[in-house]
Image (tube, rainbow, N blue to C red):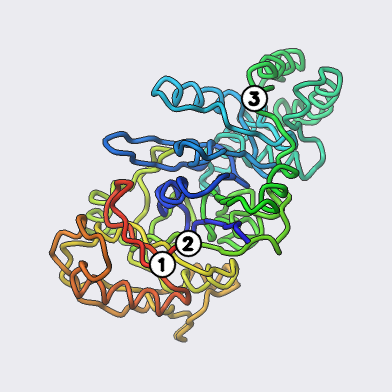
């Protein structure tokens, strides 16, 4: 069946936007299924660079319908700003569809996110402060506001009143902040109704019908596997499920309709924010990776922490997502190293461990065990086939594939749309 999931196999920032864009010309729908504007994709088209935060990458592919699924939390101000910015650059955004069941990020969510993170001090999680966590918390607590509520003022007001009854108490008594006025929030949210009305649809019905009719649907995750709220490095995670199962709950498409699950792997490892990171480099090599790789968060602007490739994480991603393929990105960044270490296992309390430990304590104390592979110095950005890569680059890719547990079907050798080697077709 022509339904694919594409997701990050590390801590996010693996280059999902490039991978989605590569497939965008061959698919009918690209669907974001979780997260909010705490995610970011950079897509390079010709000499143009696009930074997407909330919109699916398919927005840049003519003929493709981009969809924001019910599992996404939507900041309407950010969404409209992003749409406006693309329109100003000549991008047609008229085909976008938004699930009426997606939850909204409101002004009080962003306020609570920022003050609560400051309140945590040294124990802070490293959130983006964009209200994503509080919006998901309200969803689970059944006091959330959905996109469809924008079109019924009575329901919207009732829900805002119910939410602020509690939140204003917290803001005033715990954080010593001024209470938020119900009327102010309702007025702001109602102002988004008309601009968004033409985009809202029953996306679950639409996507299921599309798959049944043989159209190709690509489900695009934000963040990465190790940031999944259930399967990531909790509590240093996001508030949703970027793993493959999230594509089903976040869109209303059943698992039997998904035929392929593609994991995006960077040729080394990065993460943004706090939390354990066994292969992190706090030396010249780490700074070199950061500089050459342009490792700065698309959404946050924060420098990414950098380290060598971690095969333990890759194997874990293969297992929890049921990965059928990998897309390896940023191989070109490693050009110039004489020797390249790869983490093949961990040492924990003097013992060799080859699978990701389930214990938070053990993972915090994990020390990487490295194997070193020969590097290469040749420019690989012009390579169009696997055989055109230097022999040592080929051996590096083959070693990562063997260690990770799924075939590498495509390789990114540069930032551009056309700087990709496709070994096996994803479709």
Pick the front one: 358 or 373: 373
Residue depicted at 60% across the width and 72% down the height: 358
Pick the front one: 177 or 12: 12
Mark closest to the chain's N terminus, 1 or 3: 3
Q: CA distance from mark 1 to mark 3?
A: 45 Å
Q: Are marks 2 and 1 in contact (CB under 8 Å)?
A: yes
**Residue occupied by mark 1:** 424
The crowding category of the residue bearing disc 1, from other C-alpha atoms within 10 Å (few below 14, some 14 to 19, many at least 20), is few
The crowding category of the residue bearing disc 2, from other C-alpha atoms within 10 Å (few below 14, some 14 to 19, many at least 20), is some
Label tally? 3
Q: Are marks 2 and 3 in contact (CB under 8 Å)?
A: no
Residue 9 placed where, x, y %? 49, 62
Q: CA distance from mark 2 to mark 1?
A: 6 Å
Residue 233 placed where, x, y %? 56, 61
The crowding category of the residue bearing disc 3, from other C-alpha atoms within 10 Å (few below 14, some 14 to 19, many at least 20), is some
Residue 86 placed where, x, y %? 44, 26
Secondary element type, mark 1: loop
Secondary element type, mark 3: helix
Secondary element type, mark 2: loop
> Which quadrant is the N terminus positioned in?
bottom right
Give the label, 1 or 3, closer to the camera: 1
Q: Are marks 1 and 3 in contact (CB under 8 Å)?
A: no
**Residue occupied by mark 3:** 107
Q: Give the left or right position of residue 49, taking residue 240 as reference.
A: left
Give the label, 2 or 3, closer to the camera: 2
Residue at the far left: name it: 377
**Residue occupied by mark 2:** 426
Q: Decide: is 408 above or below 187.
A: below
Q: CA distance from mark 2 to mark 3?
A: 40 Å
């Amino acid at each position: 069946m022509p339904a694919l999931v594409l997701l990050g196999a590390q801590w996010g920032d693996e280059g999902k936007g490039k991978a989605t864009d590569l497939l965008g010309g061959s698919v009918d729908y690209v669907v974001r299924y979780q997260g909010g504007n705490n995610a970011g994709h950079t897509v390079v088209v010709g000499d143009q660079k696009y930074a997407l935060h909330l919109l699916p990458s398919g927005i840049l592919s003519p003929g493709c319908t981009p969809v924001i699924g019910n599992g996404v939390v939507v900041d309407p101000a950010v969404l409209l700003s992003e749409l406006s910015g693309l329109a100003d650059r000549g991008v047609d955004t008229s085909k976008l569809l938004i699930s009426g069941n997606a939850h909204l990020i409101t002004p009080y969510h962003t306020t609570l996110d920022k003050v609560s993170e400051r309140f945590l001090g040294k124990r802070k999680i490293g959130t983006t402060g964009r209200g994503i966590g509080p919006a998901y918390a309200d969803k689970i607590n059944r006091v959330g506001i959905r996109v469809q509520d924008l079109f019924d003022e009575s329901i919207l007001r009732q829900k805002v009143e119910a939410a602020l009854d509690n939140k204003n108490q917290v803001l005033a008594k715990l954080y010593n902040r001024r209470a938020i006025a119900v009327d102010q929030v309702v007025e702001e949210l109602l102002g988004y109704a008309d601009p968004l009305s033409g985009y809202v649809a029953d996306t679950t019905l639409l996507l299921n019908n599309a798959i049944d009719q043989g159209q190709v649907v690509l489900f695009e995750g934000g963040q990465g596997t190790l940031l999944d709220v259930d399967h990531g490095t909790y509590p240093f995670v996001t508030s949703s499920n970027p793993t493959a199962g999230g594509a089903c709950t976040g869109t209303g498409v059943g698992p039997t309709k998904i035929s392929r699950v593609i994991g995006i792997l960077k040729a080394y490892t990065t993460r943004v924010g706090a939390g354990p990171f066994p292969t992190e480099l706090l030396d010249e090599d780490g700074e070199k990776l950061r500089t050459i790789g342009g490792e700065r968060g698309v959404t946050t602007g924060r420098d990414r922490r950098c380290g060598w490739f971690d095969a333990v994480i890759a194997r874990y991603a293969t297992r929890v997502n049921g990965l059928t393929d990998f897309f390896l990105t940023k191989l070109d960044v490693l050009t110039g190293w004489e020797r390249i270490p790869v983490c093949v296992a961990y040492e924990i309390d003097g013992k060799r461990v080859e699978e990701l430990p389930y214990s938070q304590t053990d993972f915090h104390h994990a020390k990487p065990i490295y194997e070193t592979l020969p590097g290469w110095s040749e420019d690989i950005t012009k390579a169009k086939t696997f055989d055109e890569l230097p022999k040592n680059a080929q051996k590096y890719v083959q070693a990562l594939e063997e260690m990770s547990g799924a075939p590498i079907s495509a390789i990114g050798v540069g930032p551009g749309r056309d700087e990709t080697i496709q070994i096996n077709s994803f479709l």
